[in-house]
Image (spheres, rainbow, N blue to C red):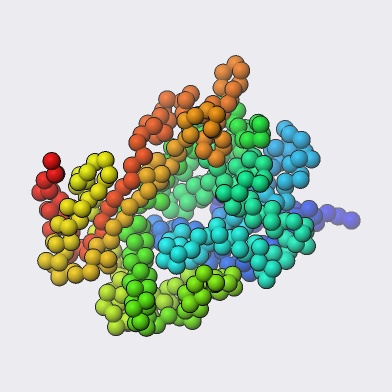
Amino acid sequence: MAAKPAKIFRDPLYNYISIDREHDAWLLTLLATPEVQRLRRVHQLGVSYFTYPGADHNRLAHTLGVVHLMHQALGHLERIHDKQEIDQARAALLVAALLHDVGHGPFSHLFEPCLGIDHEIWSKKIVMDPATEVHRILGKVDKYLPNKVADLIDKENNEHPAWQKALLSSQLDMDRLDYMRRDSLFTGAGYGHFDFYRILNSFEIDNDDLVWSEKSKLAIEEYIFARYYMYQNVYLHKTTRGFEKMMEAMWRRAKTLRDGGTDVDLVPVLRDFWGAGDNATVQQYLRIEEFTVLQQVQQWTGHSDKLLADLARRFLDRNRYAAIDPPQPDNELTGTYTRWESALYEKLRGKGYHCMDTHCLRDEVKAKYNQPYFPEKENDQQSARNAIRVRAGAAGRPVEISTILDRLRPVTERPAIAQVRYYVPYDTRDEIQNLKDQWVPQL
Protein backbone atom coordinates (compact mmCIF):
# COMPACT_ATOMS: atom_id res chain seq x y z
CA MET A 1 0.00 0.00 0.00
CA ALA A 2 1.41 3.35 -1.05
CA ALA A 3 2.25 5.82 1.68
CA LYS A 4 0.00 8.85 2.00
CA PRO A 5 1.55 12.06 0.72
CA ALA A 6 2.43 14.71 3.27
CA LYS A 7 0.04 17.58 3.88
CA ILE A 8 1.62 20.66 2.33
CA PHE A 9 0.99 24.27 3.32
CA ARG A 10 2.27 27.11 1.16
CA ASP A 11 3.98 29.67 3.34
CA PRO A 12 5.53 33.00 2.29
CA LEU A 13 8.43 32.53 4.71
CA TYR A 14 9.44 28.88 4.21
CA ASN A 15 7.73 28.27 0.86
CA TYR A 16 6.52 24.81 1.94
CA ILE A 17 5.53 23.49 5.37
CA SER A 18 4.77 19.77 5.45
CA ILE A 19 3.12 17.51 8.02
CA ASP A 20 3.42 13.73 7.65
CA ARG A 21 -0.03 12.15 7.22
CA GLU A 22 1.28 8.76 8.36
CA HIS A 23 2.93 9.67 11.66
CA ASP A 24 1.27 13.00 12.48
CA ALA A 25 -2.31 12.66 11.22
CA TRP A 26 -3.51 13.53 14.74
CA LEU A 27 -1.60 16.82 14.47
CA LEU A 28 -3.67 17.71 11.39
CA THR A 29 -6.84 16.83 13.30
CA LEU A 30 -5.71 19.15 16.08
CA LEU A 31 -5.01 21.89 13.59
CA ALA A 32 -8.60 21.66 12.32
CA THR A 33 -10.18 22.29 15.73
CA PRO A 34 -12.24 25.47 16.24
CA GLU A 35 -9.88 26.61 19.01
CA VAL A 36 -6.87 26.55 16.66
CA GLN A 37 -8.69 27.79 13.56
CA ARG A 38 -9.78 30.83 15.57
CA LEU A 39 -6.14 31.99 15.33
CA ARG A 40 -6.79 32.83 11.66
CA ARG A 41 -8.82 35.73 13.00
CA VAL A 42 -6.18 37.09 15.39
CA HIS A 43 -3.65 39.59 14.05
CA GLN A 44 -0.11 38.48 14.87
CA LEU A 45 1.03 42.07 15.49
CA GLY A 46 -2.11 43.58 16.95
CA VAL A 47 -2.69 46.99 15.37
CA SER A 48 0.77 47.28 13.80
CA TYR A 49 -1.05 47.42 10.45
CA PHE A 50 -1.93 51.00 11.43
CA THR A 51 1.79 51.69 11.00
CA TYR A 52 2.82 48.98 8.51
CA PRO A 53 -0.08 48.33 6.09
CA GLY A 54 1.27 44.89 5.17
CA ALA A 55 1.26 43.61 8.76
CA ASP A 56 -2.01 41.70 8.31
CA HIS A 57 -0.60 38.24 9.03
CA ASN A 58 -2.31 36.10 11.63
CA ARG A 59 -1.46 33.88 14.58
CA LEU A 60 -2.25 30.67 12.70
CA ALA A 61 0.45 31.32 10.08
CA HIS A 62 2.94 31.94 12.87
CA THR A 63 1.80 28.79 14.66
CA LEU A 64 2.44 26.67 11.56
CA GLY A 65 5.87 28.25 11.32
CA VAL A 66 6.73 27.30 14.90
CA VAL A 67 5.57 23.72 14.28
CA HIS A 68 7.75 23.62 11.16
CA LEU A 69 10.83 24.80 13.07
CA MET A 70 10.12 22.43 15.96
CA HIS A 71 10.02 19.54 13.45
CA GLN A 72 13.41 20.58 12.12
CA ALA A 73 14.93 21.09 15.58
CA LEU A 74 13.77 17.65 16.75
CA GLY A 75 15.04 16.05 13.55
CA HIS A 76 18.45 17.62 14.17
CA LEU A 77 18.52 16.37 17.78
CA GLU A 78 17.55 12.85 16.70
CA ARG A 79 20.63 12.72 14.49
CA ILE A 80 23.11 13.68 17.23
CA HIS A 81 21.52 12.42 20.47
CA ASP A 82 19.67 9.45 21.90
CA LYS A 83 16.83 9.04 19.40
CA GLN A 84 14.60 7.33 21.95
CA GLU A 85 14.82 10.28 24.36
CA ILE A 86 13.92 12.74 21.60
CA ASP A 87 11.07 10.54 20.34
CA GLN A 88 9.56 10.40 23.82
CA ALA A 89 9.39 14.19 23.94
CA ARG A 90 8.35 14.65 20.31
CA ALA A 91 4.54 14.58 20.57
CA ALA A 92 4.30 16.98 23.52
CA LEU A 93 6.75 19.45 21.94
CA LEU A 94 4.96 19.48 18.58
CA VAL A 95 1.61 20.04 20.28
CA ALA A 96 3.06 22.77 22.50
CA ALA A 97 4.42 24.46 19.36
CA LEU A 98 0.95 24.28 17.81
CA LEU A 99 -0.94 25.44 20.91
CA HIS A 100 1.43 27.88 22.60
CA ASP A 101 -0.59 30.86 21.30
CA VAL A 102 -4.07 29.30 21.30
CA GLY A 103 -5.11 31.53 24.21
CA HIS A 104 -4.41 34.83 22.48
CA GLY A 105 -7.30 37.27 22.46
CA PRO A 106 -8.24 39.89 19.85
CA PHE A 107 -5.26 41.79 18.44
CA SER A 108 -2.87 39.48 20.33
CA HIS A 109 -1.04 41.20 23.20
CA LEU A 110 -2.88 44.50 22.73
CA PHE A 111 -6.12 43.35 24.29
CA GLU A 112 -4.67 41.74 27.41
CA PRO A 113 -4.68 44.93 29.54
CA CYS A 114 -8.11 45.90 28.17
CA LEU A 115 -9.84 42.84 29.63
CA GLY A 116 -7.25 41.99 32.27
CA ILE A 117 -6.26 38.69 30.65
CA ASP A 118 -3.06 36.70 30.14
CA HIS A 119 -2.92 34.62 26.97
CA GLU A 120 -0.68 31.97 28.51
CA ILE A 121 -3.18 31.34 31.29
CA TRP A 122 -5.97 30.98 28.73
CA SER A 123 -3.82 28.73 26.55
CA LYS A 124 -3.44 26.35 29.50
CA LYS A 125 -7.17 26.57 30.28
CA ILE A 126 -8.06 25.68 26.69
CA VAL A 127 -5.72 22.70 26.73
CA MET A 128 -7.06 21.43 30.06
CA ASP A 129 -10.79 22.12 29.55
CA PRO A 130 -12.59 18.79 28.82
CA ALA A 131 -15.18 20.72 26.81
CA THR A 132 -12.72 21.79 24.10
CA GLU A 133 -12.00 19.74 21.00
CA VAL A 134 -8.31 20.35 21.61
CA HIS A 135 -8.48 18.53 24.95
CA ARG A 136 -10.50 15.62 23.58
CA ILE A 137 -8.07 15.00 20.72
CA LEU A 138 -5.02 15.17 22.97
CA GLY A 139 -6.63 12.74 25.41
CA LYS A 140 -7.17 10.20 22.64
CA VAL A 141 -3.48 10.34 21.69
CA ASP A 142 -2.29 10.03 25.31
CA LYS A 143 -4.31 10.64 28.45
CA TYR A 144 -1.34 12.44 30.00
CA LEU A 145 -0.71 14.65 26.96
CA PRO A 146 -2.93 17.61 27.99
CA ASN A 147 -1.02 17.95 31.27
CA LYS A 148 2.36 17.66 29.55
CA VAL A 149 1.46 20.33 27.02
CA ALA A 150 0.02 22.69 29.64
CA ASP A 151 3.21 22.33 31.67
CA LEU A 152 5.37 23.07 28.64
CA ILE A 153 3.36 26.20 27.83
CA ASP A 154 3.61 27.42 31.43
CA LYS A 155 6.89 29.37 31.67
CA GLU A 156 6.94 29.00 35.44
CA ASN A 157 6.61 25.23 35.38
CA ASN A 158 9.87 23.28 35.59
CA GLU A 159 8.55 19.73 35.50
CA HIS A 160 10.03 18.98 32.07
CA PRO A 161 13.73 18.76 31.12
CA ALA A 162 15.23 22.20 30.58
CA TRP A 163 16.09 21.53 26.93
CA GLN A 164 12.42 20.87 26.14
CA LYS A 165 11.28 24.12 27.77
CA ALA A 166 14.10 26.01 26.03
CA LEU A 167 13.01 24.88 22.57
CA LEU A 168 9.65 26.52 23.16
CA SER A 169 10.53 29.49 25.38
CA SER A 170 14.05 30.79 25.97
CA GLN A 171 16.47 33.41 24.72
CA LEU A 172 16.73 31.55 21.41
CA ASP A 173 13.62 29.44 20.78
CA MET A 174 11.45 28.27 17.90
CA ASP A 175 8.82 30.89 18.67
CA ARG A 176 11.24 33.82 18.28
CA LEU A 177 13.00 32.28 15.28
CA ASP A 178 9.71 32.33 13.41
CA TYR A 179 8.02 35.53 14.51
CA MET A 180 11.02 37.80 14.03
CA ARG A 181 11.55 36.74 10.42
CA ARG A 182 7.81 36.58 9.71
CA ASP A 183 7.11 40.01 11.23
CA SER A 184 10.04 41.47 9.31
CA LEU A 185 8.66 40.06 6.06
CA PHE A 186 5.08 41.28 6.48
CA THR A 187 5.92 44.72 7.84
CA GLY A 188 8.51 45.18 5.12
CA ALA A 189 10.83 46.55 7.81
CA GLY A 190 13.72 44.37 6.68
CA TYR A 191 15.42 44.05 10.08
CA GLY A 192 14.71 40.39 10.85
CA HIS A 193 17.36 38.76 8.65
CA PHE A 194 19.71 36.18 10.15
CA ASP A 195 20.99 32.71 9.31
CA PHE A 196 18.23 30.70 10.98
CA TYR A 197 19.25 27.47 9.23
CA ARG A 198 22.69 27.60 10.81
CA ILE A 199 21.13 28.24 14.21
CA LEU A 200 18.73 25.32 13.79
CA ASN A 201 21.50 22.89 12.90
CA SER A 202 24.31 23.77 15.28
CA PHE A 203 23.01 23.21 18.80
CA GLU A 204 23.05 20.26 21.17
CA ILE A 205 21.85 19.13 24.58
CA ASP A 206 24.50 19.66 27.25
CA ASN A 207 23.72 18.86 30.90
CA ASP A 208 20.00 18.94 30.07
CA ASP A 209 20.24 22.40 28.48
CA LEU A 210 20.77 23.85 24.99
CA VAL A 211 24.23 24.96 23.87
CA TRP A 212 25.35 26.10 20.41
CA SER A 213 28.60 25.29 18.64
CA GLU A 214 31.21 28.00 18.10
CA LYS A 215 30.61 27.97 14.34
CA SER A 216 27.12 29.37 14.96
CA LYS A 217 28.30 32.47 16.86
CA LEU A 218 28.03 34.92 13.95
CA ALA A 219 24.56 33.67 13.03
CA ILE A 220 23.51 34.18 16.65
CA GLU A 221 25.09 37.65 16.63
CA GLU A 222 22.92 38.46 13.60
CA TYR A 223 19.89 37.16 15.48
CA ILE A 224 20.56 39.33 18.56
CA PHE A 225 21.02 42.50 16.51
CA ALA A 226 17.92 41.64 14.46
CA ARG A 227 15.99 41.21 17.68
CA TYR A 228 17.18 44.60 18.92
CA TYR A 229 16.30 46.35 15.64
CA MET A 230 12.87 44.71 15.43
CA TYR A 231 11.97 45.89 18.93
CA GLN A 232 13.16 49.44 18.27
CA ASN A 233 11.60 49.79 14.81
CA VAL A 234 8.54 47.53 14.82
CA TYR A 235 7.36 46.23 18.17
CA LEU A 236 7.88 49.53 20.00
CA HIS A 237 7.08 51.88 17.10
CA LYS A 238 5.65 55.07 18.56
CA THR A 239 2.66 55.18 16.18
CA THR A 240 1.64 51.63 17.01
CA ARG A 241 2.13 52.23 20.72
CA GLY A 242 -0.05 55.32 20.45
CA PHE A 243 -2.99 53.35 19.06
CA GLU A 244 -2.43 50.63 21.64
CA LYS A 245 -2.68 53.22 24.43
CA MET A 246 -5.76 54.69 22.76
CA MET A 247 -7.46 51.28 22.75
CA GLU A 248 -6.54 50.78 26.41
CA ALA A 249 -7.86 54.25 27.30
CA MET A 250 -11.13 53.50 25.52
CA TRP A 251 -11.75 50.31 27.49
CA ARG A 252 -10.61 51.93 30.70
CA ARG A 253 -13.16 54.70 30.14
CA ALA A 254 -15.88 52.14 29.41
CA LYS A 255 -15.06 50.24 32.60
CA THR A 256 -15.14 53.45 34.65
CA LEU A 257 -18.57 54.31 33.23
CA ARG A 258 -19.85 50.77 33.75
CA ASP A 259 -18.60 50.62 37.34
CA GLY A 260 -20.38 53.92 37.95
CA GLY A 261 -23.70 52.53 36.73
CA THR A 262 -23.70 53.94 33.18
CA ASP A 263 -24.86 51.60 30.41
CA VAL A 264 -21.96 51.24 27.96
CA ASP A 265 -24.02 49.32 25.40
CA LEU A 266 -21.90 46.16 25.45
CA VAL A 267 -22.37 43.59 22.72
CA PRO A 268 -23.66 40.31 24.22
CA VAL A 269 -20.39 38.39 23.98
CA LEU A 270 -18.43 41.05 25.88
CA ARG A 271 -21.25 41.60 28.35
CA ASP A 272 -21.22 37.90 29.23
CA PHE A 273 -17.45 37.73 29.64
CA TRP A 274 -17.15 40.92 31.64
CA GLY A 275 -20.12 39.98 33.80
CA ALA A 276 -18.63 36.58 34.66
CA GLY A 277 -15.45 38.14 36.09
CA ASP A 278 -13.01 35.56 37.41
CA ASN A 279 -15.56 32.81 36.71
CA ALA A 280 -15.55 33.33 32.94
CA THR A 281 -15.47 30.03 31.05
CA VAL A 282 -13.24 29.04 28.17
CA GLN A 283 -16.27 29.10 25.88
CA GLN A 284 -17.12 32.67 26.92
CA TYR A 285 -13.54 33.73 26.28
CA LEU A 286 -13.24 32.09 22.87
CA ARG A 287 -16.35 33.89 21.62
CA ILE A 288 -14.52 37.23 21.89
CA GLU A 289 -13.22 37.86 18.37
CA GLU A 290 -11.57 40.84 16.69
CA PHE A 291 -14.74 41.56 14.75
CA THR A 292 -16.59 41.57 18.10
CA VAL A 293 -14.22 44.19 19.45
CA LEU A 294 -14.47 46.32 16.31
CA GLN A 295 -18.28 46.09 16.44
CA GLN A 296 -18.12 47.29 20.03
CA VAL A 297 -15.84 50.19 19.12
CA GLN A 298 -18.19 51.10 16.26
CA GLN A 299 -21.13 51.20 18.67
CA TRP A 300 -19.21 53.42 21.03
CA THR A 301 -18.75 56.08 18.34
CA GLY A 302 -22.40 56.98 19.02
CA HIS A 303 -22.29 56.72 22.81
CA SER A 304 -23.62 59.61 24.88
CA ASP A 305 -20.33 59.87 26.78
CA LYS A 306 -18.32 62.26 24.63
CA LEU A 307 -14.93 61.01 25.82
CA LEU A 308 -15.71 57.37 25.01
CA ALA A 309 -17.22 58.30 21.65
CA ASP A 310 -14.24 60.49 20.76
CA LEU A 311 -11.72 57.73 21.48
CA ALA A 312 -13.75 55.23 19.48
CA ARG A 313 -13.99 57.54 16.46
CA ARG A 314 -10.29 58.37 16.61
CA PHE A 315 -9.36 54.69 16.68
CA LEU A 316 -11.58 53.66 13.77
CA ASP A 317 -10.55 56.66 11.65
CA ARG A 318 -6.84 56.27 12.49
CA ASN A 319 -6.91 59.81 13.88
CA ARG A 320 -3.80 59.41 16.00
CA TYR A 321 -2.45 61.42 18.89
CA ALA A 322 0.94 63.12 18.69
CA ALA A 323 3.84 61.49 20.52
CA ILE A 324 5.80 63.69 22.91
CA ASP A 325 8.97 62.56 24.63
CA PRO A 326 9.40 64.12 28.10
CA PRO A 327 12.32 66.29 29.19
CA GLN A 328 14.77 65.11 31.82
CA PRO A 329 13.03 63.44 34.79
CA ASP A 330 12.65 65.30 38.07
CA ASN A 331 14.75 62.66 39.73
CA GLU A 332 17.31 60.72 37.67
CA LEU A 333 17.38 57.92 40.26
CA THR A 334 13.63 57.27 40.36
CA GLY A 335 12.80 58.47 36.85
CA THR A 336 9.74 60.44 38.00
CA TYR A 337 8.11 63.19 35.93
CA THR A 338 5.80 64.80 38.48
CA ARG A 339 6.61 68.45 37.61
CA TRP A 340 6.50 67.83 33.88
CA GLU A 341 3.17 66.00 34.07
CA SER A 342 1.61 68.79 36.12
CA ALA A 343 2.76 71.39 33.59
CA LEU A 344 1.62 69.20 30.70
CA TYR A 345 -1.85 68.71 32.17
CA GLU A 346 -2.19 72.44 32.85
CA LYS A 347 -1.34 73.21 29.22
CA LEU A 348 -3.95 70.71 28.02
CA ARG A 349 -6.59 72.20 30.30
CA GLY A 350 -5.83 75.57 28.75
CA LYS A 351 -6.66 74.04 25.36
CA GLY A 352 -10.02 72.74 26.60
CA TYR A 353 -9.02 69.14 27.38
CA HIS A 354 -10.06 68.26 30.91
CA CYS A 355 -9.80 64.45 31.13
CA MET A 356 -6.15 63.51 31.41
CA ASP A 357 -6.91 59.79 31.28
CA THR A 358 -8.21 60.10 27.72
CA HIS A 359 -6.53 63.22 26.33
CA CYS A 360 -3.04 62.60 27.68
CA LEU A 361 -2.00 58.97 27.42
CA ARG A 362 1.14 57.97 29.30
CA ASP A 363 3.12 55.09 27.86
CA GLU A 364 5.93 53.46 29.78
CA VAL A 365 7.90 50.79 27.95
CA LYS A 366 9.50 48.40 30.43
CA ALA A 367 13.27 48.42 30.53
CA LYS A 368 13.54 44.80 29.40
CA TYR A 369 11.94 45.66 26.06
CA ASN A 370 14.43 48.42 25.35
CA GLN A 371 17.16 45.85 25.83
CA PRO A 372 15.59 42.68 24.40
CA TYR A 373 18.62 40.48 25.13
CA PHE A 374 19.87 40.93 28.67
CA PRO A 375 21.85 37.83 29.68
CA GLU A 376 22.49 36.49 33.15
CA LYS A 377 26.09 37.41 34.05
CA GLU A 378 26.85 34.72 36.63
CA ASN A 379 28.16 31.58 34.93
CA ASP A 380 26.67 29.18 37.45
CA GLN A 381 23.23 30.77 37.01
CA GLN A 382 23.15 30.72 33.22
CA SER A 383 20.72 28.57 31.25
CA ALA A 384 19.08 28.80 27.84
CA ARG A 385 16.21 30.69 29.51
CA ASN A 386 18.39 33.65 30.48
CA ALA A 387 21.51 33.45 28.28
CA ILE A 388 22.64 32.22 24.87
CA ARG A 389 25.70 30.04 25.32
CA VAL A 390 28.18 28.78 22.73
CA ARG A 391 31.16 26.48 23.01
CA ALA A 392 34.44 28.41 22.90
CA GLY A 393 38.16 27.70 22.91
CA ALA A 394 40.04 24.43 22.75
CA ALA A 395 38.12 23.02 25.72
CA GLY A 396 34.76 23.82 24.14
CA ARG A 397 33.38 25.17 27.41
CA PRO A 398 29.94 26.82 27.12
CA VAL A 399 30.13 30.61 27.61
CA GLU A 400 27.63 33.43 27.22
CA ILE A 401 28.00 34.71 23.66
CA SER A 402 28.67 38.39 24.37
CA THR A 403 31.81 37.42 26.31
CA ILE A 404 33.48 36.34 23.06
CA LEU A 405 31.88 38.84 20.65
CA ASP A 406 32.75 42.42 21.54
CA ARG A 407 30.22 43.87 19.11
CA LEU A 408 27.39 42.54 21.27
CA ARG A 409 28.47 44.28 24.44
CA PRO A 410 26.90 47.66 23.65
CA VAL A 411 23.58 45.80 23.46
CA THR A 412 24.01 43.47 26.42
CA GLU A 413 25.81 45.83 28.79
CA ARG A 414 23.97 49.11 28.22
CA PRO A 415 21.81 50.12 31.19
CA ALA A 416 18.26 48.81 30.94
CA ILE A 417 16.11 51.96 31.17
CA ALA A 418 12.36 52.30 30.98
CA GLN A 419 11.14 54.71 28.29
CA VAL A 420 8.29 57.14 28.98
CA ARG A 421 6.31 58.89 26.26
CA TYR A 422 3.08 60.90 26.18
CA TYR A 423 0.36 61.02 23.53
CA VAL A 424 -1.74 64.16 23.16
CA PRO A 425 -4.26 65.53 20.60
CA TYR A 426 -2.50 66.89 17.52
CA ASP A 427 -3.84 70.42 17.93
CA THR A 428 -1.85 70.73 21.17
CA ARG A 429 1.41 69.30 19.83
CA ASP A 430 3.19 72.56 18.97
CA GLU A 431 2.42 74.25 22.28
CA ILE A 432 3.48 71.20 24.28
CA GLN A 433 6.65 70.86 22.23
CA ASN A 434 7.41 74.53 22.99
CA LEU A 435 6.78 73.83 26.66
CA LYS A 436 9.28 70.98 26.50
CA ASP A 437 11.87 73.08 24.63
CA GLN A 438 11.67 75.77 27.32
CA TRP A 439 11.67 73.32 30.22
CA VAL A 440 14.16 74.05 32.99
CA PRO A 441 15.39 70.95 34.83
CA GLN A 442 14.99 70.94 38.58
CA LEU A 443 18.28 71.42 40.42
Quadrant occupied by the N terminus: bottom right
Q: Could you tell whether 132 is left or right of 323 in the image?
A: right
Quadrant occupied by the C terminus: top left
Q: Could you tell whether 258 is left or right of 401 in the image?
A: left
Residue 271, image x, y percentages: 47, 79
Where 57 falls versus 398 (above or below)? Answer: below
Q: Quadrant of residue 384?
A: top right
* Residue at horizontal 80 percent and vertical 55 percent from the top: 22
Residue 18, image x, y percentages: 68, 52
Where 199 falls versus 186 (above or below)? Answer: above
Residue 136, image x, y percentages: 72, 66
Q: Could you tell whether 31 is left or right of 59 in the image?
A: right
Instruction: Decide if residue 186 is in sight here.
Output: yes
* Residue at horizontal 83 percent and vertical 54 percent from the top: 3
Q: How many marks?
A: 0
* Residue at horizontal 62 percent and vertical 57 percent from the top: 99
Query: In the displayed image of the protein, which residue is found farthest to the top?
Result: 394
* Residue at horizontal 12 percent and vertical 53 percent from the top: 434
Q: Could you tell whether 350 is left or right of 300 in the image?
A: left
Where 79 falls versus 4 (above or below)? Answer: above
Q: Quadrant of residue 26?
A: bottom right
Residue 404, image x, y percentages: 48, 24
Q: Say which of 319 and 118 sits in front.
A: 118
Instruction: Decide if residue 5 is in sight here.
Output: no
